[in-house]
Amino acid sequence: MVEENAVKRSEKAGGKVYLALLHYPVYNRNREVVITALTNLDVHDIARAAKTYGVEKFYVITPAKSQQRLLKRILDHWISGVGGEYNPERKAALELVDVASSLEDLIVDLTVEERRKPLVIFTSAKMGKNAISFARLKEKYKKGADLLLVFGTGWGLAEEIFEQGDFLLEPIRGIGEYNHLAVRSAVAIILDRLFGR
């Protein structure tokens, strides 16, 4: 039992990790800044990946009240409704999900709650300024830094949002030119690279 507890502690060594799925401001295919629609599949799959890799909280960021209400209905069904009774493992994952109206609000809330600002790490399929490798980010985490990993929807995060971050994580690269992963796939790959055994 003592050895098992030691393993659990060593697996969680480092700071706290938060995920954010940003629905605004992001681009559409015409490079216009838009609010994207929340998808049930993203919420479920990202929550399950978050639970698997020990994430503290997974935030869906949208200023759209209708989308916030939709998220609440989904969560109510799976946490306090019949869905939670039917599938307790899904309930455990979805209990990590919360909503925020903006990234700026979320950063302020986490900073107040934890009494220190997390490192805000943006993700993208492209390289950009303030790039950080998986290895360097993992080092910062192991030294105790709290991380807020921000993922975009639509056709990527709007450039204006990058002013609120600290680093841009190096992109995931496959074997060819095609590079348009579903966000839930990107989340799973990134979490595994940073925190997988």
Image: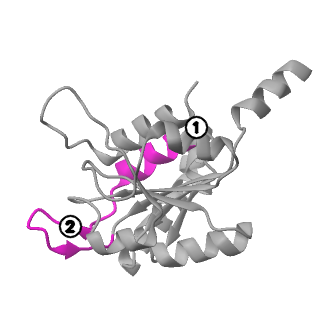
Q: With 131 as the anchor, is 103 left or right in this view?
A: right
Q: Give the range drawn in magenta.
A: 24-50
Residue 38, percent across and down? Answer: 34, 62
Q: Can residue 87 be seen in this view?
A: no
- Secondary structure of the residue carrying numbered label 1: loop
Q: Where is residue 184 shown, x and y percent of the image?
A: 36, 44
Left or right of 21, for residue 195: right
Amino acid on which disc 1 is placed: Tyr
193 vs 168, nearest the viewer: 168
N-terminal-most mark, 1 or 2: 2
| Residue matched to label 1 | 53
Query: Where on the picture, by quarter, is residue 162?
Result: bottom left
Q: Are marks 1 and 2 in contact (CB under 8 Å)?
A: no
Other residues around mark 1 within 10 Å, as few (<14) / some (14–19) / many (≥20): some
Which residue occupies 49% across, 32% down?
192
173 in the magenta segment: no
Tag 2 residue: 27
Vertical position of residue 76 compared to residue 50: above or below:
below
